[in-house]
Amino acid sequence: MTFKDSLAFLKSKDFTMVRYERKGYDAFLKEAKLKPNYPYILIAGSNGKGSTARYISSIYHEAKYNVGSFLSPWLHTPKEGILYKGKPIKEETFTRIFEKYLPLFKKYNLSSFEITTAIMMEYFNEIHPDIAVIECGMGGEMDATNIHGSSPILSIITSVSLEHKAFLGNTTDKIAEAKAGIFRKNVPALIGSMDSKAYEVIKKRADDLLISLYNAPIPSDFLISGRTSSFLYKENERIELSSPAYSLALDAALAIKATRILSSQFPCSFKALKHGLKVPPLPARFEIQDHVIFDGAHNPEATKSLVKSLEYFLDNTKLVTLFASFKDKEYQQELALLKKISTAIYLTTFPHSRARMKDDYSFLDYPFIRDPFAAIEQLKKEYPEHYILVTGSLAFALYMAERGRKDVL
């Protein structure tokens, strides 16, 4: 079997937005006798979990720990999301583990994400990282990364927003309940900012499980310098980031707090913390190419944070927005927020089975340009003094940003 064969099988098992249960997955884990045998941090949340995971991983890497990371979504293949010491799992290793468990993958009809999570666990069990930083997929309680009978050393919920309502619930308190499913008795938990209803649900779960619940600090004295930023950590110490995005400062603050909570188990110096947080952000997280900003904000909460970042960054420069969304997202609220800071908004689509097409926007009074790359070129000509924002979906922003990077090369 080849790596391409494994990818073809995974593609046939993409049940995203179709199935959300774990009966087969739990049966697989039991028969395979598979669970983590390494210390790990588990991160759930509507927004910011990928960047928070990246920052924590980078800090521990700078502190000379051997760090495993599991991040999603990936751009091309799932091996990009399984990292050890910052490097992706090798294709031959991925394929070997895939082939080892293939009969059980078939027997229990696992989804592509469940399969990839299982491969990650087996890989990390083999190489024994000092610590692993694991990003949940959707939700928390039902997520494949949430292994029943196993406990992380720290649980993190970065945020709670209205998304995936068909699976997680149609209110923030119900979504918070789903995400709090990653909590374990006597395991500390860390949370970012969220509304009072979500907080009350999470606080109750923490109290029921005798959990120490920590709140991440809000970055103070946030400053932008060109395409970087900084905020105050202690009275005379500033943290520098390789991005001007305020949203990433929030994620960095979460990462700092996480490493402080675990300082007795995994001590790291302030120097390692500062250097770790200078890591370049993940693709399409306020990624700037010339005068185009690519950002994967895909729900109202993320869009509010994006708007705040733009208000800091733009100064007196104007903005025009190119927007594309998945069909299951709260796009009307996102557009209402973006309208406040945009000279104009244009709609488009991109190659994805869940992407909205022109008819899905039929009642909105915004121009629609089917080809997003043609739209970028048109906006550059019509708005030469503006920044162009490409947003509405992480998949869309990633797709567009990658093309932009290739064009530069």
Image (tube, rainbow, N blue to C red):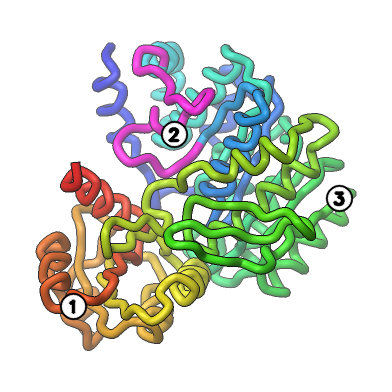
Which of disc 1 and disc 2 is earlier in sequence?
2
Element type at marker 1?
Answer: loop
Quadrant in which residue 99 is drawn: top left
Element type at marker 2?
Answer: helix
Q: Label 1 amino acid?
A: Tyr
In the image, residue 77 lies in the stretch drawn in magenta = yes
Magenta residues, start to end: 71-93
Which of disc 3 and disc 2 is earlier in sequence?
2
Vertical arrangement, residue 316 with respect to residue 255, above or below: below
Q: With 131 as the anchor, is 228 left or right in this view?
A: left
- The disc placed on residue 383 is 1
- The disc placed on residue 247 is none
Residue occupying image coordinates x 72% and y 31%:
149
Q: Label 2 amino acid?
A: Gly
Residue behind mark 2: 81
Vertical arrangement, residue 256 with respect to residue 244, above or below: above
Q: Nearer the viewer, mark 2 or mark 1?
A: 1
Which of disc 1 and disc 3 is earlier in sequence?
3
Crowding at mark 2 (Cα within 10 Å: few <14, some 14-19, many 20+): many
Quarter of the image where the C terminus is located: top left
Q: Position of residue 11 (x, y in %)?
A: 29, 35
Q: Position of residue 291 (x, y in %)?
A: 27, 64
Q: Label 3 amino acid?
A: Ser
Residue behind mark 3: 212
Residue occupying image coordinates x 65% and y 24%:
64
Residue occupying image coordinates x 40% and y 86%:
340
Q: CA distance from mark 3 to mark 1?
A: 51 Å
Q: Position of residue 347 (x, y in %)?
A: 22, 73
